[in-house]
Amino acid sequence: MALIGYISSQTPGHVLNSFDSFLGGNLITFPSVKPPSLDKIQCIICHDSMDFLMQLYCPIGDSKYHRALYIFVCLKAPCQMSGNNWKVLRSQYFTEFDRNLQSEPCTNWCAEDDSDSDGESWGQDVGRNIETHCEVENSNERSSVFNGRFRCYSIDIYEDSTTSNFTEPEIDTANHNDNDNQIKSNSSSMKYFLSRWSEKAVIDKEFIEEDDNTCPGSFSDALLSHIISRGEYGCEDIRYCWSGQPIFNGLPSLSACDLTNSSICHRCGTERVFELQIFSTINNSLKLSTTLNEKDFDEMINLNWLLNIVTVLIFTCRNSCWSQITDDWIEECIIVQTDKNVTKIISPL
C-alpha cells in the first residue's frame, strides 16, 4: 500500500528531531552525525550549495538501522531549466534494540511518537544556526542542525486507498532487446520500469484543467490518469511506496548505458527500487522563510511557484547498503521531469 502526504498549512506543533518528517525548516541529523559537507550538496550546474527541501524518516522493516532521506534543490533558473538541480542523500543510524523485525519493508513514515494514526501533522522549525544542536528524546547523544531557507510545515500522512486509472506499462518491443528478459524476475526494480515504460492514451485530457503555472502538454496520459483519480483532495504532494510502482510523466528513449549507470547501486551493485515521488503541487506549500530577504534569491525565480517540475522520482538501493563505521551520507538516484518536458537522471558515479 502506498502512502500519500499532503503538506499541512500548519507549522509543526512540537520540537522536531531526527526521527521526524517535514518540509522546509532545518535538516536534523541522526545523533553524533555531522551535517553533509558542502561538496555533498553542491549543484552540478552552478556549483553553489543547494537548499535543503525535505527530511523523510523512512526505516526499512527488516533493518536494525534508523533511516532517513534528505532532499536538496537548487532554485537558480538555469539550473532548474537543466533538470540537474536535485540531490537526495540517505543517512542511517544503528540502534541496539530490536525494532520488531518484519519480513516485508516498513513503508510508514513514522515519527518517534507514532500514535498519529489519523494523519496528524509532524515537525517544527528548530532555529537557524549552523552546527547548533537539539536534544534527542530518550538519548544523551546530540544531533546537528543544517540551515534551511524554506518555511517549515508538517506533513499529513494517509494510506492511499484510491486506485489510479493507469496500469503497468506494456513492453515497447521496438525499443528494447532480449536483454529485457534478464529483469523480468524483478518487476519492482528501477530498470524494469525504465525499460518498459511507453506512453499510452489512458484517459481523455479534457477531464483535467490546465494549471497556469505549467506548460500546456506537460502532463502525460499516465500522470493525468493518476491526478484525476485523486478525488476532492486533489493530487498529493508526496507519494511513498518502497519497492512499489512510480508514476512517470512519460519517458524519452533511454540507452542501455543510461539504464546500467542509473539502475544499479554504485556501491554494492544491487538494483535500485522506487521509493518516493514528489509532485508539482508541493509548490502550493513551499515558501521562503520570513527571516530571509527575497533579494537573496535569483530574480528570475517565481516566488509563488518555486520549483519548475512536473514530478521528481527517487530510487534507492534495494539493500540500503551501509557501513556503520565509514558511512555518513550516501547519494541516491533521482529522475527529474521538468515543466519544459525535460527528463534528467541524476545518479551518483
Image (cartoon, helix red, strand yellow):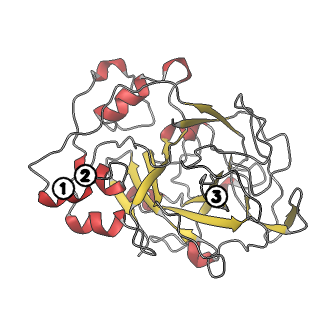
Q: Label 1, label 2: how many angstroms apart (C-alpha)?
A: 5 Å
Q: Position of residue 333 (x, y in %)?
A: 44, 62
Residue at 46% across, 60% down: 318
Mark 1 or mark 3, earlier in chain: 3
Task: Look at the picture and state if 323 lies above or below 22.
Answer: below
Mark 2 or mark 3, earlier in chain: 3
Please give left or right for residue 48 compared with residue 112 in the image.
left
The dot on residue 283 is none
Is the C-beta separation of discs 1 and 3 under 8 Å?
Answer: no
Residue closest to the eye, 97 or 219: 97
Residue closest to the eye, 231 or 138: 138
Looking at the image, is mark 2 or mark 3 nearer the viewer? Answer: 2
Asked if one can make out residue 265 in the rendered structure from this viewpoint, the answer is yes
Amino acid, disc 3: Ala
Q: What is the secondary structure assignment of the residue under circle 3?
A: strand
Q: Label 1, label 3: how many angstroms apart (C-alpha)?
A: 33 Å
**Location of residue 49 (image quadrant):** bottom right
Q: Position of residue 129 (x, y in %)?
A: 82, 66
Q: Position of residue 122 (x, y in %)?
A: 75, 41
Amino acid, disc 2: Lys
The dot on residue 181 is 1
Residue closest to the eye, 312 or 81: 312
Residue position for label 2: 184
Amino acid, disc 1: Asn
Query: Within 10 Å of the Cα at label 1, are there few (<14), some (14-19), or many (20+) other Cα atoms?
Result: few
Residue position for label 3: 68
